[in-house]
Amino acid sequence: MSLLELKNVYKIYGDLHALDDVSLKVEKGEWLAIMGPSGSGKSTMMNIIGCMDKPSKGEVLLDGVNIAVESAKNLTNIRRDKIGLIFQQFHLVNYLTAVENVMLAQYYHSIPDEKEALEALERVGLADRAKHLPSQLSGGEQQRVCVARALINHPEIILADEPTGNLDDANEEIVVELFRKLHEEGTTLIVVTHDPEVAETAQRMVVLRNGKISKETVNEHFTGHIRFH
């Protein structure tokens, strides 16, 4: 059984089909990139996979559970327990330190544990920046705090929305290298990106256009390393 499966999924707003009969499977431990122009349905798909929205029609199976029919409360619990979210805009609390921002995710899941949060920061190379506020961190460091925050509750899936969109090439490479290590550890990664170089680091890529999957490719030379031209 696939970890995630979308079956004939639609998301309809009036006359607009943001998603139009989309079917997709993601296996446990897979690294999938989702690409497409603005308005193609990427964010809509991410919101549905991330339990932040429901489809108008179709099934979305996560670990065998059809999240398309779950209540808002259950969706919150599923998102908390199974999904680690990483955003382009970081969404860090500006008056909390790096380690406190990571512990905040624990607060909604279990009991905050500073030792565990520090270990998560160490995994992303930020142990020495744990007591710094977001304003004292570079964009790349802030994004790595977001990765640590997403990891802290040991999610089934890491779902990243344009995780390198605000980063320069050097920090983009650092974040993609983190994804490579997570993939080696068996983490399932779904990365929404506009950047073809980031997409090419994934095992598989799907392209959305007008709410439909227009292209699907497998990376036959998959290494997980970013290749700048």
Image (spheres, helix red, strand yellow):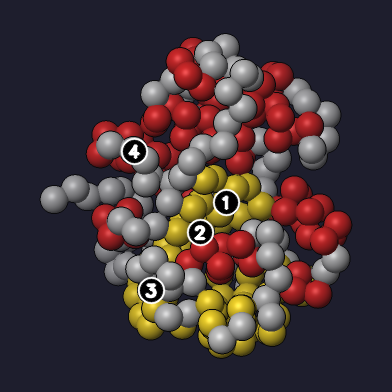
Q: How many marks?
A: 4
Disc on the earlier residue, 3 or 1 = 1
Q: Amino acid at mark 3?
A: Val
State which mark lies toward you, 3 or 2: 3
Circle 1 packing at 10 Å, graded few (<14), some (14-19), many (20+), is many
Circle 1/circle 2 CB separation < 8 Å: yes
State which mark lies toward you, 1 or 4: 4
Q: Secondary structure at mark 2?
A: strand
Q: Which quadrant of the figure has residue 175? A: top left
Instruction: Name the residue carrying label 3.
Output: 207
Instruction: Name the residue carrying label 2.
Output: 190
In the image shown, does 49 or 117 lie closer to the viewer? 49
Q: Residue at x 43, y 27 (%)?
A: 141
Give the residue at the far left of this rendering.
229
What's the distance in space between the residues labelled 1 and 2, CA to CA?
6 Å
Give the residue at the far front of this rendering.
14
What's the distance in space between the residues labelled 4 and 2, CA to CA?
19 Å
Q: Which mark is residue 167?
A: 4
Instruction: Name the residue carrying label 1.
Output: 158
Res. 184 in view = no
Q: Residue at x 68, y 65 (%)?
A: 53
Q: Amino acid at mark 2?
A: Ile
Res. 42 in view = yes
Disc on the earlier residue, 3 or 2 = 2
187 with respect to 171 (left or right): right
Q: Amino acid at mark 1?
A: Ile
Q: Secondary structure at mark 1?
A: strand
For the N terminus, which image quadrant?
bottom right
